Amino acid sequence: METKYTKNAGGECGDCNLCGNCGSLDCPEGKNMYTMIIYSENFAGILNQITAVFTRRQVNIESLNVCASSTPGVHKYTITCFCNEEMAMMLTKQIEKKIDVLQANYFTDDQIFILEACLLKVNTNMMLNNKDVGRIVRIHGARIVEVNPTYSIIEKKGITADILSLFHQLDKLGVVLQFVRSGRIAVTKSCIEQLDRYLEERESQR
Amino acid sequence: MMERISGAEAMMRSLEHEGVEVLFGYPGGAIIPTYDALYDHKETLNHILVRHEQGAIHAAQGYARVSGKVGCAIVTSGPGAMNTISGIADAMVDSTPMVVICGQVGAAMLGTDAFQEVDVIGVTQPISKWAFQIRRSEDIAWAVSRAFYIARSGRPGPVVLDFTKNAQTGLVDFEPQKVNFIRSYKPAPVPEDSVIEKAARLINNSVKPFVLVGQGVELGNAQEELREFLEKAQLPAARTLLGLSALPSDHPLNMGMLGMHGNLGPNMMTNQCDLLIAIGMRFDDRVTGNLNTYAKQAKIIHFDIDPSEINKNVRVNLAVVGDCKQTLPAVTRLLDKTTHQAWIDGFKPYAEKEDNKVIHPAIYPTEGPLLMGEVVRKVSEATEHKAILVTDVGQNQMFACRYFKYSQNRSIVTSGGCGTMGFGLPAAMGATFGAPDRTVCMFCGDGGLQMTIQELGTIMEQQAPVKIILLNNDYLGNVRQWQYMFYNKRYSFTPMVNPDFELIARGYRIPCRTVVERADLEGAIQEMLSTEGPFLLQCAVKAEDDVLPMIPPGSNIDEMLLEVK
Ligand SMILES: Cc1ncc(C[n+]2csc(CCOP(=O)(O)OP(=O)(O)O)c2C)c(N)n1
Ligand SMILES: [Mg+2]
């Protein structure tokens, strides 16, 4: 099942930042979801510097993922936020200005492959007594990875909208004990590897 | 060649290796090992003991601004480091190259709220170009070299080194390092040839070009390149507050100063030109006024070394991102030799109007109390416009910057982006070390002087030849002016009862004189300039004077007020 982002559909809570209250993925007026992909040296304190740029510019970080990249010694940050393109540009420039940041770029959803994951802990008894649970799990392509007499664990990978849809539907049935959604991870669709290019260029200038 | 020495000694040798000659500092528990090592390096590292760490940081700024070298301050942990914060933030926004070394508790005690432990990195990271904690003696050579490289290269800025006690006392095999490459940091991007060509084409096609000159020209040592650029195509120019000495005051293409208290012509013409060429300036709100009406009719080219300045406040048509020392001559080569006489003549009526309404009355009054403007112009004349102007913040700053004249590079030291009161006195003290052959004139108000007045002690001890001109109006004058203009003359906490400043100067054994009468002014200035060493000249100026012209905050720049209703 695919849910599309609905822009400015005006959910009940208005200025929606994926709080999930209304189940829609409304994006605040004039804004878009941007995914920032940032590479830095593996030094302490850089995450602080990056997040401080968002704070100063009054942009909320919606999700954040940090991990080592495929290049040894280089860390990759994947950050999502709602803003307009001008702001996305300013944010990435100000982040890139930090001495130990190698590159910062922003992308719209059509420019990247996206993955998020979630874990749901549900009440086993209630799950077994309600046929809808299994149906919802199946139509969302989720997996049950643990069943014990007390609780069961459901896992799902996908995009934000599908994951939230799974959660909201199960939550309505009152079976959810815990829910957690990961930060977004993303790789670019481009055939050019920007980081490799950058590092090659810089090495040639050393 | 390796040698096993203490971290503190390694710090001294690293500083020497970077060519440091002067350090402004104040000792304390967490930096004692380094001060112990310094004791053996007094011949090469001239340490100036200040009276408050804010004095050290502003002195380092003054030193850096006039010399172009990296200013260096050294302080202890916790309170010592915290006293430098305003200067670090000031240096960041005003792009001043500086390295600040702070003592820190031993690495084993970090995070335990140990005595005089403050999270200096956490505090300074957002307000510095780079902040690094040296926790091991092994990292000193690398960190110091990297710090100086970052501070002085690209768009300069302050770097903080948080130096833990164990790193100071630990032994290390020392070998100096030279960092001049950081792969994640491109100090000066190089624009494509096509960008240079486009810039030249835009300028060649322009009928009414106007150049905005910022401090970037001085930071890039491109004053000569700027002149050639302007002269070849006869481009009229105006300077920002920090860019004032990048182009001599009397240069025929110099149309004056930009901004809230700048000159009428440059502000008016910004909204009439067809091409705005900004060089090494950042479209601060004090320059642009209301952005919605700022230069909307013009195409805009922005020369800057910092990519994050492009399109930050003002959307530009072309960005020439790079070092203006290179980009300016590259564009100049492609410029047509032209004149824009009719356009340049268009500045004249504004200049005449401002001259009649504002300037003449401000600098040539014939009656009434002394005015700030006349004192400033008299001092400038008495130094043949060759002195370095250092200012504090307030009306004194605006009058000083407006009416001082500049004939040499790097002649203005003022706190622009932050407007830090208390900056003037220590910055001037530092400037005398950065430019020992030049006269340093520091203008300040009665409010600002009292913010760092303790540095009179340093000035006395060093016999630093700061010519202090106190423009005393017994008011926090700048705020009073705003209260007068925008708050119905409600002078909420701006009148001030002042001490006897002459008595204070005498306490510090600094020669001084007070001028009340116009007739005594010139003689007093002569006495100040002919007295060797420091001098305090107190001028009792008009209590309620207003800096004019003025663009009220948030107004359109072509709505400059020439008088206060
Ligand atoms: C550290 C600091 N505190 C407060 C201010 C706000 N402020 C700007 S100008 C000014 C008045 C300055 O008075 P004075 O030094 O006497 O100079 P004047 O304007 O009278 O020439 C004040 C309070 C500031 N810029 N910096
Ligand atoms: Mg005053």
Image (tube, rainbow, N blue to C red):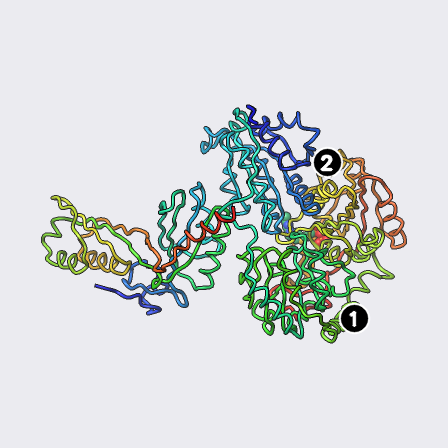
Chain letter behind tag 1:
B
Q: Quadrant of residue B276?
A: bottom right
Q: Residue at the spot x=60%, y=69% of the render?
A: B294
Check the image and report above or below for B551 versus B18. below
In the rendered image, residue B458, in percent from the top left (x then y), is placed at: 72, 36
Given the image, on which type of amino acid does mark 2 rest? Thr
> Residue A134, how many percent across, how many down?
13, 56
Instruction: Identify whether B268 is placed above or below A89.
Output: below
Q: Which residue is mark 1?
A: B352
The image quadrant that residue B468 belongs to is: top right
Q: Is A35 left or right of B279, judged from the image as shown? A: left
Relative to B84, B62 lies left or right: right
Q: Who's the residue at 58% across and 50% down the image?
A: B154
Q: Position of residue B306 (x, y in %)?
A: 56, 55
Q: Are marks 1 and 2 on the same chain?
A: yes
Q: Quote the CA–CA distance across marks 1 and 2.
A: 44 Å
What chain does mark 2 sit on? B
Identify which residue, B564 or B85, lies in the foreground.
Answer: B85
| Circles 1 and 2: CB atoms closer than 8 Å | no
Judging depth in this view, the residue of B393 and A78 nearest the camera is: A78
User: Which of the two labelled residues, at mark 1 and mark 2, occupies the earlier sequence position?
Assistant: 1
The residue singled out by tag 2 in the image is B458
Tell me the element at label 2.
helix
* Amino acid at circle 1: Glu
User: In screen coordinates, is B76 left or right of A56?
Assistant: right
- The percent coordinates of residue B113 (x first, y second) are 47, 32
